Image (cartoon, rainbow, N blue to C red):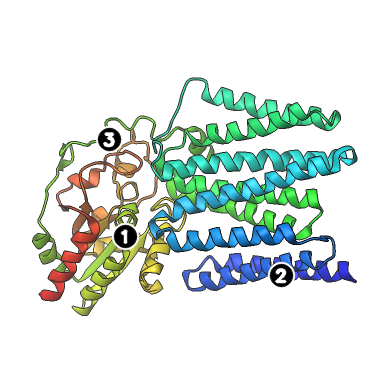
Amino acid sequence: MIDYAMDATYLVASVFFIIGIKMLSSPETAARGNMLSALGMLMAVGATLVSGAIPDFTWIMVGVVIGSVVGIVGALLVKMNDMPQMVALFNGFGGAASALVAVSEYYRLGAQLSPFITVVILLSLFVGWLTTSGSVVAFLKLQELVSGNAVVFPLQHMINLVLGLGTFAAMGFLVLEPGHENIFFGIIAMGLLLGVLLVIPIGGADMPVVIALLNSYSGIAVSFTGFVLSNNVLIITGSLVGASGIFLTKEMCDGMNRSIWNVLFGGFGADAGSGVPAMEAPGGIVKPYTIEDAITVLENADQVVFVPGYGMAAAQAQHVVRELGEALEDRGITVKYAVHPVAGRMPGHMNVLLAEANVSYDALFDMDQINDDFVNTDVSVIIGANDVVNPAAEEDPSSPIYGMPILHVDRSKTVIVLKRSMNPGFAGIDNLLFYRDNTMMVFGDAKATLTKFNEGIKAG
C-alpha cells in the first residue's frame, strides 16, 4: 500500500509540475505556476521521506537547513539585474547534485552494478559535471569577471570532438570492465573540462541561449539520476525540465535567426574589434541631444514605445520607466512596452524586471505583436538595448547578426536612445540605429535620465 501511495503522490506531483510549467508561459499566471510546481516538489519530497526507505533524517535536515539559509539569503540579497547570474548558478547546482548522487551510487553499489545502472550513472556523472562547469563559466561571463566575448583558439572544435568521443569510449570500457577508479575520475575530469570548453567560445549576445541550454542539461542529468535511483518523480521532473529547456533554446535561436550549432560553434563575438565605435558612419552621424530636447519630443507624442535592454537592468531603472510611462499616460499619451525574446541576458529577463516594477501585462508586447505598429509610433525610447534594435541585422550582410529578427524601432518618427557612452553592448557590435537621422542620442545614466524625463513631464 505504501508503494501505491507513493506512486499516486508522485503522479499528482508530476501533474502539478506540468500545469506549473504551462502557467509559466504567461506573466499573469507565472507566479501561481511557480507556487504550484513548488507544492508538487514538496509533495514528492514528503512522500519519499515518509516511505520508510530512509531510516535517519539527520543529514537530510542538515542539508535542508543549510540550503534554506543559502536560498533565502540569496533571494533577499541578489538584485533583479543580477538574476541571470543566479539562474546560471542554479543550473550548475542542479548538475552538481545529479553528479554527486551518481558518485555516491557508484561507490554504494560497487560489485552490484548492472550494465544498465552503470550506463545511467556515467551519463548522469558526465552531463552533471559538464553542466556544473559550463554554468560556472556562464556565471563568470555574466558577472563580467571574465571576458564576455567569445574565446576561441586553433583546433578548438577538434579538441572538443576528441574529448567527447574519448569520454564515451571510456564509458563503454567502464561498463565492460567496472572497478577502474582512474577511468571513473577521468570521465569526471573530461566532463568538467568539456563544460568549460563548450561555453567559453560563446559570446555575450548568445547568453540567453546558453542559459536555456544549460537548464536543459541540468534536467537531463536529473532524469538520469531518476533511473539510477529508480525514482519515477525524478525521471518525470528531469524529462520535463530537459524537454522544456530544449524548446526554450529553440525559441531563443529562432529569435536570433540562428541554429543551435551556430550558437555553440560559431564563436560569435570573437572579432568584436576595439569595442569603441566612431561618432560617424556611412549611414549618418551621431547627434547628441539634451534632456530638455527629449522631454519636448515626448510631450508632443501621441504614442510612445519603451524598448528595454540590459542597460535598464544594469541601471535598475525599471521602476522609473513605469513611473514615466504613467506620467505620459496622465497626459493622454498611449504607452507600450516592446520586448524582444532575447533582450537581456536570460530568457524573459525584461519581462521579469517590468513585472517586478508592476508594469501592466496588457502594456507588454512581444516582437511579432508590435513590429507593425512602429510606423504609427511617434517616439520609441531605447533603454540600453543594442542588437535587438540594430538595423544591421537587416541591412548589412557582413554583420554577425545579419538575419536576426529585430524590433523595427527605426521606423518610428523619432527614436530616443539612452546610453552612457558610444561603447557597444555586451556583444561588441556597433549599432547603425545610432547614426540615423531620426535618432536622438541622450547620454548619461539611464535611471538618472529617466528621472529627469519624469520630472520634466510632470512639471509641464
Q: Is residue 329 visible?
A: yes
Give how far apart the Cα atoms at labels 1 and 3 are: 24 Å
Q: Is residue 300 visible?
A: no
Quadrant (top left, top right, bottom left, bottom right) of the N terminus: bottom right
Please name the residue shown 48% across and 34% down the image.
200
Give how far apart the Cα atoms at labels 2 and 1 are: 37 Å
The residue singled out by tag 2 in the image is 43
The residue singled out by tag 1 in the image is 316
Quadrant (top left, top right, bottom left, bottom right) of the C terminus: bottom left
Estimate how packed mark 2 is, as few (under 14), some (14 to 19) or many (20 or more) residues with alpha carbons within 10 Å. some
Please report whichever mark, 1 or 3, sits nearer to the chain's N-terminal start: 3
Task: Classify 460 as above or below 367.
Answer: below
Give how far apart the Cα atoms at labels 2 and 3 are: 51 Å
Q: Amino acid at mark 3?
A: Gly
- The nearer-to-camera label among 1 and 3 is 1
Residue 445 percent across, percent down from the top left: 21, 54
Mark 3 falls on what kind of element?
Answer: loop
Please name the residue shown 30% across and 46% down the image.
390
